[in-house]
Amino acid sequence: MSYCVNPSCAQPKNPNNVAVCQSCGSQLRLNNRYQPLGILGKGGFGATFGAADISLPGNPICVVKQLRPATDDPQVYKMAKELFEREAETLGKVGNHPQVPRLLDYFEQNKEFYLVQEYVKGYNLHQEVKKKGPFSEAGVKQFLTELLPILEYIHSQKVIHRDIKPANLIRSQKDSKLVLIDFGAVKNQVNSMVANNTQTAFTAFAVGTAGFAPPEQMAMRPVYASDIYAVGVTCVYLLTAKTPKDIGCDPETGEIAWEPYVNISDSLANVLKKMLEVSVKHRYKSAEQVLDAMAMAPYEQGMQDSMTTMITGFKTPSSSSSPNSSLSTGLVSSSPSTRTMGRVNTHISKGSPMSSVSPEDKHSVATKIQGRVAGCGNANYNIAHGQTSSRRRGKGQGISNSDTIATKKNQKKWQEKTLLTAYENGRRDFTNQELNELNLSKAFLPGINCYQAKLSRINLQGAELTRADLGRADLTQAVMKNANLSEAYLGYANLNGADLRGANLCGANLTYANLQGANLCGVDLSSARITEAQLSVAKTNWRTVMPSGKRGFW
């Protein structure tokens, strides 16, 4: 079947073997090359068609987007053409990313403009939610881990998408990866220009999709953070299967009233809150900031859990502290000292066993806990602020000689059995411990905290290490083949000569990790936090998926 693209045609469907529409007489083939097969969608200023490229063997399917300036004004037409060509050039550049459809062609025909892009077969996220139901929290985190690097790339090309929503995110049937489609940049600029020149009500088509676009974009002043807001609204839809219109907003603040509809951790809720700030001033400014917040959440929550455990430990003189847990995901936004004191005082004020203790004693306990936190340090807080970890500070910088001696006393040489037993009994914190050469093949250790631990030549082949904290750990010549390190933190770790073949590093953070001689053959690094400089000294092969999404050597 051939399909007529003339918007006025009464009977656009035609037999496959005709060159001219039998209803309106329009030419069916576009640019003497593309044969429209059917309509995929339409709006006030154009439509999108599926088409066959008959100039290539096999007649591959592509997507043809039609843009019609809704005016006969020659000056408007000239400006529209200039904007169209400029935006086609931009889309050609952006389409170099494997998760953005490539721009294949662009042309003008009968005073209408056409963009031809790669066809992505699959379901969009709106269809996916309708079919399978809302996403889990883990599913939304995975979604953010995959989408935000794409957005980071788009913004690096000085492009604002302006219409991010579930319908514009397709799960590719080929490899299950997300593909960001329909940039709408040409349409938006042309429409705003038409509106300014003809004084007609075209602005509704110029600001993206209502509910997903933030206030500054509705006011025709989009910034990079506008896309962050749209991603936040998309997350709410994925969690609730409800659009912003279904949820409604707070009449006093204008914010989407989404929180009663979800059941998620504080960490993800806090990230979403900041993504959905109505004021650009208080919103995340970049995709990188969101990724950083998500990466830090588990480690800061671990500190909070540790402080809560310490306070709970004052119930009776004989009570023992419950184990720390780095599996929880929390997000803290203030300084470490303020966070510590605030959490301590809050805990005490809510009817804890210490509520009857005098104010002086309460302050003493809080101060001791704050001092302990300062001694242990928060690697992620320090990294984010360009500081060296407090564990690495020397004399006169927050750690006394007695603290150092106490830390050494807490270290011991672990055996496989004792470590696994301790983990099964609830222990998660193995910070600074001696774990060299242990055989923990196929061990189940999600959320384990081995920050700055000695793990050289350890065998972790096939181990489950999801969200593990291995920051600053010595993993020299460690065997981590086929290990699950998804969302693990490996910042500043020494992975010199480590075997990571086939490991799952989805969402893993390897910021400043030493990868000299590390074997990354067959590893998918498309969503890992890693740099070109790091990879230049590591071993890769044709099966390694690079951060760009392409396979092969760096």
Image (cartoon, rainbow, N blue to C red):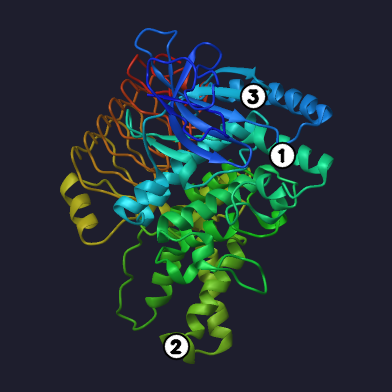
Checking the image for residue 113, the label placed there is 3
Q: Amino acid at mark 2?
A: Gly
For disc 2, the neighbor class at 10 Å (few under 14, some 14 to 19, many from 20) is: few
Please tell me which residue lies in front, 537 or 32: 32
Helix, strand or loop at label 1? It is helix
For disc 3, the neighbor class at 10 Å (few under 14, some 14 to 19, many from 20) is: some
Label 3–label 2 contact, CB within 8 A: no
Q: Residue furthest bottom?
A: 356
**Relative to residue 548, is residue 506 depicted above or below?**
below
> Can you give x and y, in whole percent of width and height, for residue 542 in the image?
34, 14
Please tell me which residue lies in front, 279 or 547: 279
The total number of labels drawn is 3
Closer to the chain start, of discs 3 and 2, is 3
Seen in the image, is 202 located left or right of residue 308? right
> Can you give x and y, in whole percent of width and height, for residue 67 in the image?
63, 30
Helix, strand or loop at label 2? It is loop
Please tell me which residue lies in front, 363 or 262: 262
Q: Amino acid at mark 3?
A: Phe
Q: Residue at x 43, y 85 (%)?
A: 352
How far is disc 1 from disc 3 in space, using C-alphas? 14 Å
From the image, tell me which residue sits under label 1: 191
From the image, tell me which residue sits under label 2: 351
Closer to the chain start, of discs 1 and 3, is 3
How far is disc 1 from disc 2 in space, using C-alphas? 60 Å
Helix, strand or loop at label 3? It is strand
Closer to the chain start, of discs 1 and 2, is 1
For disc 1, the neighbor class at 10 Å (few under 14, some 14 to 19, many from 20) is: many
